[in-house]
Amino acid sequence: MLKSLTIENYALIDSLNVEWDESLNIITGETGAGKSILLGALGLLLGAKNEGQATKDLERNCVVEATFDIAKLNLEAIFEANDLDYEPEITIRRIITPAGKSRAFIGDMPVQLATLKEIGAHLVDIHSQHQNLILASEEFRTTTLDTLAANDPLMEAYTAQLATLNALRAEERRMHTEFEAARKDEEWLRYTVEEFRAAKLKEGEQAETEQTLATLESADRIGEALTTLRNTLDDEELGALVMLTRSEREFEALGESYPTGAAIAERLKSVVAELKDLSATAADETERIDADPEKLQKLSDRLNTIYSLEMKHRAESYDDLLAKAATFEARLATIDNSDAELKALEARIAEADGECRKAAKALHNSRVEVAKRLEESVVATLRMLGMEDAQFVVEIAEREQYAPLGTDDVAYLFTANRTTKPAAVERIASGGELSRIMLALKALIAERRMLPTVIFDEIDTGVSGRIADAMGDIIARMAETMQIVDITHLPQVASKSGAHFVVYKEEGRSNIRRLAKAERVDEIAKMLSGSEITEAARKQARILLSK
């Protein structure tokens, strides 16, 4: 509910503040007084772009601010999604500098215009004459049925099923694209995989082979070095082992008379043991290392195979080569398994399609069930508004393809004459007829769902007399359960019980003020008789106000 609106330095408005009634608010005023400016300022708060120069005084900012009571609108989740603090009463402020720069705030938090627009859509519904064109929107026609049928749970179920189905279909398209791309290279891929399989690469093989090959290539030098070492250690006369063993025995014999000799003998014993082990190792290595040309060639060929694969596949290392081989194997496996994978996915898609079709059918059946009530209600309201022969038909046709709102094509058919066949309302109805149809729909929706503040901007255009009075009654009844702001030129509508504001110009500036009961008589009399108020007009105004 809109509680207050403050506007400073916007277009022809210097400064004004309006405190709104929680039910019906009537706004009247001469053409050009500034009623549309009020709506323009309110539109800025709801996220509209600043078209042109908003500021009248180029020395100060344009500021539009409004307070809303949102306790009954269930907006907590939307505030949380936008990282905003929720309060039952909020203030929205929009500031536009003389340079045209804009800033917006909800409470004390700065917000983007997109956020302002999202939240504003839940606060105020501005219905202008141009909004009658919304009847041409199938989305509006469909959601109206859903509102009357309380289809929110069915719509949520359908949306979830459609999202699942669309995700599976996207996966199917991705797989087809991937498989087709893979199949283009299938012949090369199979050859490459067979080449890798034939190579029988093993973890760490390259480093091990390189080391073995390097050893074999130096076999002669290694053999000479080992022979020299063995001769140095094992020579029967001058070998290090013979001489050190002799010294060990001598010092061991001196142990009793020369205590240090025993320690030297023990250390020599350790050295001799280590050299014997070294000699044994040299003997074993002499046996093992053999300049085998055949083995040398075999290892060289193996390394050439590995190097060739690394160059061919631009591998940065042997591990990289193994990773590429695994990738090729996986790609080939994908091709080999593609038919089975696609078949399994198609089964899941068929199942999801069935569930989605079932959810769409539930929506369709619910809409068909409520369509008759919508027809009867709209026709009843139109007859109240003087269209005795009006026919209003809701036509629902199922289509094969899915859409965000289901599989229904919803059309509203209308005729004002009993002898004329109903046709699409957006093509056949006049401006006045469209206004009455929209009012009937809005009134019906208001009975079923908590709506935000509704602003009717001359929805009564094209009607007069008794019909205008009936239209005013419908608007007044809507205001019993919600807040209505109605901009009107019709005295029959302006006389309905509620707060009455008049927009006027003074010294080139637009202003607005709430009328006292006595002032309403003169305002409505002016609407009846023009600028010169007659006593007869005042009398008629009192009659209208007394109803």
Image: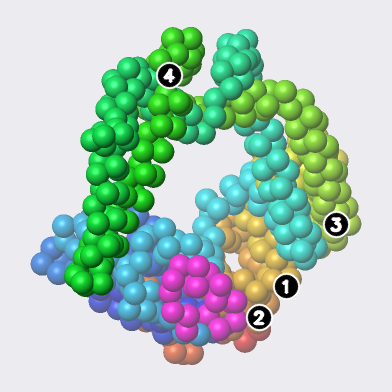
> Residue beneath label 4, please?
290
Residue 366 circle label: 3
In the rendered structure, are the residues bearing label 4 and label 1 in contact, judged by CB atoms less than 8 Å apart? no
Q: Nearer the viewer, residue 215 or 282?
A: 282
In the rendered structure, are the residues bearing label 1 and label 2 in contact, judged by CB atoms less than 8 Å apart? yes
- The picture quadrant where one finds residue 24 is bottom right
Q: Main secondary structure of the magenta part?
A: loop
Residue 132 circle label: none
The amino acid beneath tag 1 is: Glu
Residue 218 on the magenta span: no
Secondary structure at numbered mark 4: loop
Residue 481 circle label: 2
Please tell me which residue is depicted at 54% across the width and 25% down the height of the picture. 201
> Residue beneath label 1, please?
447
Residue 82 on the magenta span: yes
Real-space CA distance between mark 4 and mark 2, rounded to the nearest whole angstrom: 105 Å
Density class for disc 2 (Cα within 10 Å; few <14, some 14-19, many ≥20) is some
In the rendered structure, are the residues bearing label 2 and label 3 in contact, judged by CB atoms less than 8 Å apart? no
Q: Which circle's residue, 3 or 1, is located before the other in the chain?
A: 3
Residue 36 image position (x, y, % from top left): 39, 62
Secondary structure at numbered mark 2: loop
The amino acid beneath tag 2 is: Thr
